[in-house]
C-alpha cells in the first residue's frame, strides 16, 4: 500500500488554507489560468475550420474509450502479443511497489547508473524516483517542468504543466543555485535563454543515461505501440538514445487501433494546450533493428494496475476514460485557487478528487470529493465526457453510507431535515432565526461575524433582511 | 393557468423581497399563483452532502405539496435543478415515486425560463435607471441551460443597459456547504468574481440565485464596495430594484 503511505490527501483542508494565503503561488496561478482557458477555447473553436464538430467528436472519443474498457482484457492480450512480436518485453505490475521493484531489477541487470526520464505520472504513483535513488541509480527528469520540480525537491502540481505553481523568479533562483552561477533579473523575455540553459545540462544526461523511462499517452493494441504526445524533444531523446527503454503506464491507456489513436489525438492536445497537434507525437514500436540509426536495444512495457482494475464494472468506471489532458483542472475555480499540491497526491483538480480516493482509499481522502463548488465546469470541458461532479457525488454518498462523515455534519443535516419535515415547527423556527439574524446585524443590515458559520463571515459580510420571513409576511398580506 | 410558487429557504429567511417580486411578476402576467403552505426545503443540502435518505424524505414531501398545479415556478436555478434533474434520479427505481417525481420535474421551471419561454412575456417590464452586469449561476447555466432568458428579459426593462463582465460564466465560489467548509478557498474564488464585476463597471450585479448573490454581496461589501448594488433578477424585472 505505498500509495496510502505517501498520500497527503487527508490534509487537504489545512493545505488549502496555506495555499490560498501564499501570495507567490497566487501570482503564478493567476497568470496561468487565462492562458490555459483561452488556448483551449481557441483550439476547440478552430475544429470548425477543419470541418469538425466538437460535440460529435467528443461523443466519438467517449465511445472509443468505452468500447476499449468493455473488453479491456482482450485489448491488453492483443497488445502484449503484438508488442512481444516486435521484440519488446511486456511485464505486469499490481501496484507501485511492484513497478519500482521491476524497474530497479531491469536497471541492475543492465548495469544502469543513471536513468533519464520523460514525464510519467505513473512513476509518481509508484514513487519510482525514490526507489531508484535508494538502489543507487540516479533518476533525472528531463521534461522542463519536471526538471524544475525535481531540482526544487517537489512533486508536479499539474499533470501537463508540472511547474505551473512556480514564478519565473523562483525558477531563476533554482537554476542559479543548481547550475552554479549568480542570480540574474529575469522577465518572460528571458524564458528562451533559461530553457537553453536547462537544455545544455540535460543534453549531457541524455547522452550518458543507460536507461530511458517514459510513460505513454496511449498504447495501441493493433501494433503493440506506445504513443507519446509532448511539446519538448526530451521524449524522443529518452526513448531512443539509451540502450534500454522502459515504458511505465496504466492498463487503461490502451486503445484498439491506430485509427482510434488518431481520433483521440484530435481532442487531446486541443483540450490540454489548445494546439491542433503537439510539437512531437512519437509512435514507438519495437527495438532497434539491424540497419536502424537509433532506438533502444531493449524495450520493456510495464503495464500497471494500481487500483484501476477495481474500477471496471463499478460505479466509477467512467473515470477510466480519462486521457489526462488536464482540461478539468484548468477550468476548475478550486484548482486555480490552490494549485495541485494541496490535493496531496499525484492527481490534482477534479480528476484527482475522484482518482485519489479511489486509488488510495476513500477514508484517506475524505475532503477531496467535497472540494468542489459543484459548478460543473470540469464536466462541461472533459473531452471524453467524464461526469466528474457525479462521480464526486457518488463518493460523498459512499462516505455517508460507510459512516465516514463527521458527527457534527451528520447531526446538522439530520436536524435540518427533521425540522424541514415539520412545516409548523419550521415556520416558527425560521421566524425566530430571522429576528435573531436581524438583531445580530449592524446599522447597515450586515453581520460581520456569525458564530454559526465563522469561515463564511471571515471573508464576507452576511447581508440580512428586515427580520421577517417571506411566509410570515405573505400570511399577513393574505389576512389584510 | 394555476401555478405554485416555490419560495426557496434562502429567499424565505434572507430576502423575502425576491419572493414578492416573483409573485408580482407572475400575477401581473395573469397567472393564478398559489404559495403552497407546507413548503420548506427541497432537500438540496442533504443531497449535496451525499445523504440520499434525507434528500429523498424531503423530496417526497415537496412532490406531494407541488402536485396538482399546471406549473411550479422557482426563483432559483439551483433548487429548480434539484427538482428537475435530481428528483427523477433519486426515485429512478421507485415504482410509486418515480412517475410522480418525473411528472413534477417536467412542470417545474426556473423563473426567468418560465417568463421568457413559457409565458413569452412580450412587452416592456419595469423601469431601471442604470447599467447591470449578469452573473450566470452554475446550476442554472450548466444544469438547465439558462443563458439567453435572463438577458432577453433584462433587455425589456426600460432604461436598463447590460454591461457583460468577462468570465460571467465563472463560478462565484458559493457552492452551498462548500463556502462554509472551505471558507477561505471560497473567498479566493469570489474575489475573482468581484474583480470581474468591478471591471465591468456596472451599477448593479444581477443574478438568478440568492445563494450566489449573498456570497457576492457579502464579499463586495467586505472589500469596501458600498455602491455596486446586488439584485435578484426578479427584483429588477418587477421594478423592486429601484425601491
Image (cartoon, rainbow, N blue to C red):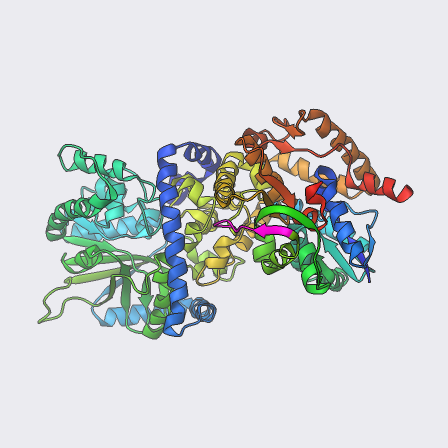
Residue B169, compared with residue A78, is above or below; it is above
Looking at the figure, which quarter contains the N terminus of chain A? top left
Residue A286, compared with residue A446, is above or below; it is below
**Residue bounds of the magenta highlight:** B159-168
Q: Who is closer to the viewer here, A90 or B239? A: B239
Q: Residue B220: x, y in percent?
A: 55, 36
Q: Who is closer to the viewer here, A398 or B10? A: B10
Q: Is residue A178 left or right of residue A67?
A: left
Q: Who is closer to the viewer here, A287 or A433? A: A433
Q: Residue A212: x, y in percent?
A: 19, 54
> Does the magenta segment cover residue B160?
yes
Q: Which residue is depicted at the point 80% across and 54% down?
A: B27
Q: Which residue is depicted at the point 53% across and 37% down?
A: B182
Q: Residue A324: x, y in percent?
A: 38, 56
Is residue B151 in view from this perspective?
yes
Q: Is residue A306 left or right of residue A452?
A: left
Amino acid at each position: 500500500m505505498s500509495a496510502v503511505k505517501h498520500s497527503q490527501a487527508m490534509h487537504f483542508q489545512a493545505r488549502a488554507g496555506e495555499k490560498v494565503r501564499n501570495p507567490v503561488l497566487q501570482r503564478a496561478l493567476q497568470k496561468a489560468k487565462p492562458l490555459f482557458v483561452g488556448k483551449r477555447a481557441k483550439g476547440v473553436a478552430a475544429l470548425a475550420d477543419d470541418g469538425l464538430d466538437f460535440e460529435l467528436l467528443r461523443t466519438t472519443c467517449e465511445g472509443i474509450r468505452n468500447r476499449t474498457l468493455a473488453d479491456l482484457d482482450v485489448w491488453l492480450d492483443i497488445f502484449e502479443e503484438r508488442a512481444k512480436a516486435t521484440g519488446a518485453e511486456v511485464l505486469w505490475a499490481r501496484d507501485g511497489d511492484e513497478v519500482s521493484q521491476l524497474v530497479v531489477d531491469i536497471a541492475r541487470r543492465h548495469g544502469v547508473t543513471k536513468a533519464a526520464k520523460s514525464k510519467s505520472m505513473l512513476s509518481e504513483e509508484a514513487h519510482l524516483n525514490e526507489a531508484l535513488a535508494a538502489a543507487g541509480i540516479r533518476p533525472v527528469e528531463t521534461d522542463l517542468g519536471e526538471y524544475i520540480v525535481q531540482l526544487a525537491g517537489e512533486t508536479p502540481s499539474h499533470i501537463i504543466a508540472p511547474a505551473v505553481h512556480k514564478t519565473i523568479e523562483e525558477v531563476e533562483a533554482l537554476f542559479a543555485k543548481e547550475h552554479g552561477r549568480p542570480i540574474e533579473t529575469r522577465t518572460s523575455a528571458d524564458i528562451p535563454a533559461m530553457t537553453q540553459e536547462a537544455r545544455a545540462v540535460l543534453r549531457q544526461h541524455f547522452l550518458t543515461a543507460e536507461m530511458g523511462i517514459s510513460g505513454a499517452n496511449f498504447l495501441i493494441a493493433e501494433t503493440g505501440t506506445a504513443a507519446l504526445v509532448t511539446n519538448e524533444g526530451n521524449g524522443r531523446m529518452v526513448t531512443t538514445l539509451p540502450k534500454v527503454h522502459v515504458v511505465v503506464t496504466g492498463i487503461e491507456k490502451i486503445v484498439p487501433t491506430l485509427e482510434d489513436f488518431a481520433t483521440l489525438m484530435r481532442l487531446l492536445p486541443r483540450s490540454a494546450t489548445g494546439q491542433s497537434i503537439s510539437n512531437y507525437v512519437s509512435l514507438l514500436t519495437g527495438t532497434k533493428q539491424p540497419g536502424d540509426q537509433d532506438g533502444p536495444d531493449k524495450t520493456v512495457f510495464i503495464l500497471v494496475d494500481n487500483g484501476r482494475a477495481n474500477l471496471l464494472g463499478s460505479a466509477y468506471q467512467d473515470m477510466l476514460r480519462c486521457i489526462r489532458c488536464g482540461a478539468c483542472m484548468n477550468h476548475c475555480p478550486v484548482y486555480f485557487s490552490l494549485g495541485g499540491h494541496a490535493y496531496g497526491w499525484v492527481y490534482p483538480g477534479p480528476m484527482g478528487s475522484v482518482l485519489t480516493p479511489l486509488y488510495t482509499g476513500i477514508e484517506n481522502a475524505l475532503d477531496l470529493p467535497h472540494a468542489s463548488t459543484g459548478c460543473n465546469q470540469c464536466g462541461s470541458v472533459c473531452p471524453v465526457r467524464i461526469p466528474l461532479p457525479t462521480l464526486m457525488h457518488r463518493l460523498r454518498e459512499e462516505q455517508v453510507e460507510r459512516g465516514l462523515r463527521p458527527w457534527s455534519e451528520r447531526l446538522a443535516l439530520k436536524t435540518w431535515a427533521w425540522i424541514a419535515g415539520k412545516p409548523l415547527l419550521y415556520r416558527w423556527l425560521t421566524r425566530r432565526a430571522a429576528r435573531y439574524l436581524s438583531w445580530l446585524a449592524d446599522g447597515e443590515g450586515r453581520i460581520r461575524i456569525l458564530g454559526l458559520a465563522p469561515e463564511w463571515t471571515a471573508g464576507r459580510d452576511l447581508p440580512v433582511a428586515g427580520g421577517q420571513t417571506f411566509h410570515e409576511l405573505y400570511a399577513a398580506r393574505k389576512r389584510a | 393557468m394555476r401555478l405554485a410558487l416555490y419560495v426557496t429557504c434562502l429567499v424565505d429567511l434572507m430576502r423575502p423581497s425576491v419572493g414578492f417580486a416573483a409573485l408580482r411578476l407572475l400575477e401581473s402576467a395573469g397567472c393564478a399563483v398559489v404559495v403552497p403552505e407546507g413548503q420548506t426545503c427541497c432537500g438540496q443540502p442533504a443531497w449535496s452532502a451525499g445523504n440520499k435518505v434525507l434528500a429523498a424524505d424531503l423530496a417526497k414531501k415537496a412532490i406531494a405539496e407541488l402536485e396538482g398545479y399546471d406549473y411550479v415556478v422557482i426563483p432559483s436555478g439551483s433548487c429548480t435543478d434539484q427538482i428537475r434533474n435530481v428528483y427523477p434520479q433519486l426515485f429512478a427505481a421507485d415504482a410509486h415515486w418515480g412517475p410522480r417525481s418525473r411528472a413534477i420535474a417536467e412542470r417545474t421551471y426556473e423563473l426567468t425560463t418560465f417568463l421568457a419561454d413559457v409565458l413569452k412575456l412580450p412587452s416592456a417590464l419595469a423601469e431601471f435607471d442604470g447599467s447591470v452586469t449578469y452573473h450566470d449561476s452554475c446550476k442554472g447555466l450548466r444544469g438547465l441551460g439558462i443563458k439567453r432568458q435572463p438577458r432577453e428579459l433584462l433587455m425589456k426593462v426600460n432604461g436598463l443597459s447590460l454591461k457583460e463582465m468577462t468570465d460571467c460564466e465563472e463560478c462565484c465560489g458559493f457552492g452551498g456547504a462548500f463556502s462554509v467548509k472551505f471558507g477561505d478557498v471560497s473567498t479566493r474564488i469570489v474575489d475573482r468574481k468581484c474583480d470581474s464585476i468591478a471591471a465591468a463597471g456596472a451599477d448593479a450585479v444581477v443574478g438568478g440565485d440568492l445563494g450566489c448573490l449573498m456570497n457576492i454581496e457579502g464579499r463586495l461589501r467586505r472589500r469596501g464596495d458600498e455602491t455596486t448594488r446586488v439584485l435578484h433578477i426578479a427584483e429588477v424585472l418587477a421594478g423592486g430594484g429601484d425601491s
